Image: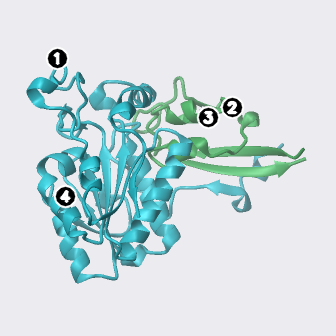
Chain colours: A green, B cyan
Amino acid sequence: MAKVRGYVVVNIERCKGCDLCVVACPTDVLELQPREVNDRGYHYAYMKNPEDCIGCTNCALVCPDACLTVYRKKVG
Amino acid sequence: MDTNNIVSPENLVYAKPELMNDTHMHYCPGCSHGVVHKLIGEVIGELGLQETTIGIAPVGCAVFAYKYLDIDWQEAAHGRAPAVATAVKRLNPDKLVFTYQGDGDLAAIGTGETIHAANRGENIAIIFINNGIYGMTGGQMAPTTLDHMKTATCPEGRDINLMGPPLKILDLLALLDGVCLATRQSVHSAAAVKKTKRMIKLAFENSLANKGLSIVEVVSTCNVGWKMTPANANEWMVENMFPVYPMGDLKNI
């Protein structure tokens, strides 16, 4: 069976750290930065487990600030 | 596998809609407005109507909607968006005209304009964001506030014996002959977002086909007004808002 790999690019300065993408992710890929903040002081989202991403776009669909760009590729 | 192999244009599956510009949105973190703005941008982009769309911005949290989507906009006085849209659409019958209104704008001060525009069957689309509270002014009670729901002006919770029950304006509008689409959706999950996008597209197509007035109610969260985290607000909405404002089409002809 072909495996699907995805990758989420976060627009760090647009992110407001609302956590909705983290909740929406079915494979527990995303997390909010525990310490780092962007210029506006928000704990932005980042890929904690990038190897688990399947590129389902759930995170990007529910993101209110359109700061996520999703890529998906079939491998193997 | 190297991430550089995945991050390339041919593998792109989701990006910010082209119509949405880079202006930083003023909405609170987790606000549903951003998602709906995104959907409107996507739908207009897919229909190829950037040059022929006129949006009517409301008063309320979405008062700056014109700053974020690169289409033509007109700002209306509080609650008067359907009246302005009526004039714009009658003068430009070949244009797509839609209003974007919150519950304070559409269901409180603008009830008269909304009902009469719907009754006349104006060929406009209305995107109605219902979060049961006045967000911009600091979380006061709205006509759509739920029974026992606490707000700044009903700190003990809304008492329906004193203040009346929540106003289900979509049910009211669905009864009018001029309305061709009255549907209630939400944007709390990926599946709901996709469905809402389909209904917004249908509403815009109805407006272009001059079928009558289409209204898409989006039951939304106001996590700051409700004093919850965005994720908790979504759960609270599913638990408490959906029984009062059930999802689905009330009218689709």
Residue at 48% across / 64% down in the picture? B43
Whole-angstrom CA distance, mark 3 to mark 4, is: 38 Å
What kind of element bears circle 2? loop
* B164 relative position to B238: left or right: left
Q: Check residue A27 in the rendering and tell me which mark sits there, or answer none.
A: 2
Whole-angstrom CA distance, mark 2 to mark 1, is: 41 Å
Chain letter of the residue carrying label 2: A
Per the image, the residue denoted by label 1 is B156
Residue B133 in the image: state x and y as whole percent: 23, 35
Neighbourhood count class around disc 2 (C-alpha, 10 Å): few under 14, some 14–19, many 20 upward: some
The quadrant of the rendering that contains the N terminus of chain A is top right
Write down the quadrant of residue B205 in the picture.
Answer: bottom left
Residues at marks 2 and 3 touching, judged by CB atoms closer than 8 Å: yes
Residues at marks 4 and 2 touching, judged by CB atoms closer than 8 Å: no
Residue at 29% across / 49% down in the picture? B170
Per the image, the residue denoted by label 3 is A25
Chain letter of the residue carrying label 4: B
What kind of element bears circle 3? loop
Neighbourhood count class around disc 3 (C-alpha, 10 Å): few under 14, some 14–19, many 20 upward: many
Per the image, the residue denoted by label 4 is B114
Whole-angstrom CA distance, mark 4 to mark 1, is: 31 Å
- Badge 4 and badge 2 in a common chain: no
- Badge 1 and badge 3 in a common chain: no
Of labels 4 and 1, earlier in sequence is: 4
Amino acid type, label 4: Thr
Residue B217 in the image: state x and y as whole percent: 34, 49
